[in-house]
Image (cartoon, grey):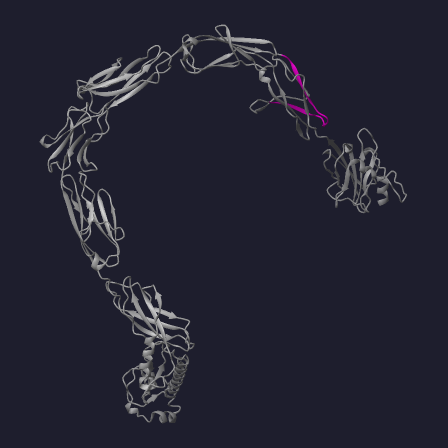
């Protein structure tokens, strides 16, 4: 069957061992003769590829037993083999080299073509054979490969890059290569960068009729096919036109019925603009006389004689066309600035005068006053064209009014105005007094700030000490010392909006001094501050002066610190001393009426002694004798307190003195110790009670003491002590072992006794030997089983009342640290830990048994 398939597939196959090519010819569908039972299936697909890219040609979904790929070029009928696999692996023919880089995809009959050329376009046929030994099937896969070419970058051509407005032109989008069909899009970009599409076509050329100035801008074309899209570089289209009728702008801008107007002595700029391409050339004419060439004609400090007609001529030199426009300019000059308004008091502050001034200008400006008035208790409006208006206080409101002067001029488009307000000062008049530096005069001043117009003020004092009736008389000058104490000085203030004047008064008094404490107590060595302040008083005083306890004015800055203002003075006494600084200090001041003093008593106390200190423990903390633990206690603190301690130590020689007797050795040691210097270690923590001294010499005997200190004094040192030796660390272990052994022996003995008592009927002899004979008549009545057990056991709690019968005593272990115990009571002694001053504790265990 395999041979038959090969005859069907190959009409001619060279049998030489050096086969270079295989020629495969298609068998027409109607002419294919297959043995009965065979099946032939046809598949037809279209595949699109791109030049230079990769494409895959499929031959079924599974790998056939045999397959042959062939190629038929469009326009021919020849079928040429490309790849075949007859069961021994794929073989690629030389024809495949012209179709691109062809490879067979592993585990399939599909082929991949890399860097696809245009020559690969055509019909690819795959003949696939399946189940050739059982039930053969033959598939014909017709793959129509279409190779497309991407479009290249197009280029834009213009028939005229600078057409005249109204003419016709064409644009062409050139393209070197690309697979049809190709679409062309035409884009326009204006000067602001906005891109729009204005045409689409399948042709690469368009015509533009009636070109106008709006067509000026950047142009580009976009060419695209089914593969890609490319955009050309942009080209600039410059439309030639103009000039249009010129537009003239006058700066500063001012328009009247007869044309434009300008203010005299200002700079006037005439700007001419006419739409044109290329840009127009401009010429200015004044009353038909050429005065300037250029688009902007500027007149510096224009005068009224510059009034006339100004014409602008615009001409396009490329097209040799021109246009012209004429305007009329009139020079006016308004008043300088703007109106100025003021409100004044008149007729001894009983009338109000409104003044509006705006001098100059041509023509003269018009002025109009507006505001609110009171007529018969009703509020009315003021309308007056006079520059000066006189108003009575009766026609004004006491809350004030706003008056506006409106000015207008022919040249100005808008009216200009100024405003002034008449109102009473918001606060009340204020009176105060002050003295000159040389204390020659006392000045009484009266102010009533604010308000419009300014109020009239004057003084009236007792005894004809007054000055009034004139403006700016708000100060009353008195010779120093002539002011009358307790008598009021009155200031009167009159405003045009008020029918009655306002007043404020001053009553001159002597100063009053205050202090926080009249008696100040402090410990010596401290800084203390004495205060002196002036009670609220309107009358100014001289400088506040302090005198020390000797009655001398304070000047020494090393001993005293003086801080003061006009209202207070604080004196600081530095480093106070009991003998030098105790006493009375005086604060003094005066004013134009009188003086005042205040005394402050300073009590400087001795700093109290620190409390006493007692050393309660001085002991070496190890057998090496190089560290000592110290512990001390402090008595009640008292008033002085303490800030720390001096921990002092010294050492004594241990060499014996052969010349002294044994009973004098202690006296000699103390004499030697007293001759040694004490070395101080400062402890700054007042709460410290324990300290460890390290770095000691083991062979030297030391003495230690503790002295309390505070800020000013040093207390009494504690009694000197020599460190004690540490207690042996083996003693607690031995005592603990002994106690544990005794407890264990006592527990075993107790168990043995309980066992004998419970089994006294089984072992009567052993029971009688330990407890003796017992009579049944002596047994007590037993009501409960528990009583029976307890009675049989014959036990009592430790510490209970004794009962008749023999007493068993547990033997006691010997202890070298405890006293000799009583023979009747066993005792267990515990050795206290090192440093514990408590006595050893004895524990006694007594077991009593009673016979039945």
Task: State whether residue 186 appears in this view.
Answer: no
Q: Along the line of sight, which residue is nearer the eye, 211 or 609?
A: 609
Instruction: Name the residue located 17 percent from the left edge and 24 percent from the top edge.
Output: 470
Percent position (x, y) of residue 740? 40, 81
Q: Quadrant of the C terminus?
A: bottom left
Q: Relative to 29, is 354 on the left or the right?
A: left
Q: Does residue 230 sit above or below 611 in this rendering? A: above
Q: Does residue 627 sit above or below 454 in this rendering? A: below
| Location of residue 251 (image quadrant) | top left
Q: Relative to 405, is 519 on the left or the right?
A: left
Q: Is residue 202 magenta?
A: no
Range of magenta residues: 167-188
Task: State whether residue 692 appears in this view.
Answer: yes
Q: Along the line of sight, which residue is nearer the eye, 531 or 455?
A: 531
Instruction: Name the residue located 34 percent from the left edge and 78 percent from the top edge.
Output: 672
Percent position (x, y) of residue 484? 11, 36
Percent position (x, y) of residue 98? 80, 35
Q: Does residue 361 sit above or below 484 in this rendering? A: above
Percent position (x, y) of residue 754? 37, 85
| Location of residue 64 (image quadrant) | top right
Q: Relative to 515, is 669 on the left or the right?
A: right
């Amino acid at each position: 069957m395999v041979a038959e398939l090969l005859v069907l597939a190959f009409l001619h196959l060279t049998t030489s061992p050096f086969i270079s090519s295989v020629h495969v010819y298609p068998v027409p569908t109607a002419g294919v003769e297959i043995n009965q039972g065979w099946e032939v299936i046809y598949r037809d697909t279209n595949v699109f590829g791109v030049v230079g890219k990769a494409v895959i040609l499929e031959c079924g979904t599974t790998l056939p037993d045999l397959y042959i790929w062939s190629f038929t070029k469009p326009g021919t009928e020849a079928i040429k083999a490309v790849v075949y696999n007859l069961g021994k692996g794929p073989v690629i023919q030389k024809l495949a080299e012209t179709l691109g880089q062809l490879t067979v995809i592993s585990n399939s009959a599909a082929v991949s073509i890399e860097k696809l050329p245009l020559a690969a376009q055509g019909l690819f046929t795959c003949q696939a054979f399946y189940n050739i030994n059982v039930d053969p099937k033959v598939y014909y896969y017709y793959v129509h490969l279409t190779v497309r070419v991407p479009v290249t970058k197009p280029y834009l051509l213009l028939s005229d890059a600078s057409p005249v407005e109204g003419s016709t032109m064409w644009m062409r989008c050139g393209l070197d290569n690309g697979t049809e069909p190709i679409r062309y899009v035409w884009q326009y970009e204006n000067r602001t960068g906005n891109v729009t599409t204005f045409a689409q076509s399948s042709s690469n050329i368009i015509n533009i009729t009636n070109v106008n100035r709006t067509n000026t801008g950047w142009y580009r074309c976009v060419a695209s096919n089914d593969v890609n899209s490319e955009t050309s570089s942009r080209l600039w289209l410059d439309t030639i036109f103009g000039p249009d009728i010129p537009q003239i702008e006058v700066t500063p801008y001012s328009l009247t019925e007869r044309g434009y107007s300008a203010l005299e002595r200002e700079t006037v700029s005439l700007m001419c603009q006419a739409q044109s391409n290329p840009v127009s050339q401009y010429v200015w004419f004044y009353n038909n006389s050429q005065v300037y060439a250029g688009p902007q004609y500027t007149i510096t400090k224009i005068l009224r004689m510059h009034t006339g007609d100004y014409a602008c001529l615009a001409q396009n030199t490329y097209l040799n066309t021109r246009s012209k426009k004429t305007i009329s300019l009139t020079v006016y000059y308004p008043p300088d600035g703007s109106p100025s308004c003021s409100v004044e008091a008149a007729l001894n502050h009983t009338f109000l005068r409104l003044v509006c001034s705006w001098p100059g200008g041509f023509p003269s400006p018009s002025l109009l006053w507006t505001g609110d008035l009171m007529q018969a208790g009703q509020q009315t409006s003021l309308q007056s064209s006079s520059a000066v208006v006189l108003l009575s206080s009766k026609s004004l409101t006491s809350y004030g009014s706003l008056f506006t002067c409106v000015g207008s001029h022919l040249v100005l488009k808008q009216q200009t105005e100024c405003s002034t307000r008449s109102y009473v000062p918001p606060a009340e008049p204020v009176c105060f007094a002050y003295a000159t530096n040389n204390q020659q005069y006392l000045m009484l001043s009266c102010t009533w700030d604010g308000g419009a117009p300014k109020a009239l003020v004057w003084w009236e004092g007792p005894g004809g000490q007054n000055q009034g009736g004139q403006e700016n008389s708000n100060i009353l000058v008195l010779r120093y010392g002539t002011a009358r104490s307790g008598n009021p000085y009155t200031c009167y203030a009159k405003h045009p909006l008020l029918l009655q004047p306002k007043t404020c008064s001053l009553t001159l008094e002597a100063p009053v001094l205050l202090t926080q404490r009249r008696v100040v107590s402090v410990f010596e060595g401290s800084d203390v501050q004495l205060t002196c302040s002036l009670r609220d008083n309107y009358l100014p005083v001289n400088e506040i002066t302090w005198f020390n306890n000797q009655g001398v004015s304070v000047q020494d800055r090393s001993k005293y610190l003086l801080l003061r203002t006009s209202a207070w003075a604080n004196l600081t006494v530095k480093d106070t001393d009991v003998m030098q600084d105790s006493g009375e200090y005086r604060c003094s001041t005066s004013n134009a009426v009188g003086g005042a003093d205040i005394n402050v008593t300073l009590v400087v106390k001795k700093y109290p002694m620190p409390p006493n200190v007692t050393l309660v423990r001085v002991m070496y903390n190890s057998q090496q004798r190089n560290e000592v633990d110290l512990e001390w206690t402090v008595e009640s603190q008292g008033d002085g307190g303490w800030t720390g301690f001096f921990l002092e130590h010294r050492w004594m020689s241990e060499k014996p003195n052969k010349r002294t007797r044994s009973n004098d050795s202690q006296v000699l040691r103390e004499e030697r110790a007293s001759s040694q210097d004490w070395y101080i270690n400062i402890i700054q923590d007042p709460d410290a009670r324990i300290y460890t001294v390290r770095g000691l010499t083991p062979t030297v005997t030391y003495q230690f003491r503790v002295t309390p200190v505070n800020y000013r004094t040093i207390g009494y040192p504690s009694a000197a002590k020599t460190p004690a030796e540490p207690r042996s660390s083996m003693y607690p272990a031995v005592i603990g072992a002994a106690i544990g052994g005794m407890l264990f022996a006592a527990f075993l003995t107790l168990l043995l006794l309980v066992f004998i008592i419970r089994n006294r009927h089984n072992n009567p002899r052993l029971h009688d030997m330990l407890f003796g004979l017992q009579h049944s008549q002596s047994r007590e009545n037993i009501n409960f089983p528990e009583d029976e057990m307890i009675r049989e056991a014959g036990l009592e709690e430790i510490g209970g009342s004794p009962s008749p019968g023999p007493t068993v005593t547990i033997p006691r272990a010997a202890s070298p640290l405890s006293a000799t115990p009583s023979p009747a009571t066993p005792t267990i002694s515990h050795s206290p830990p090192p440093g514990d001053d408590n006595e050893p504790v004895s524990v006694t265990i007594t077991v009593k048994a009673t016979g039945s």
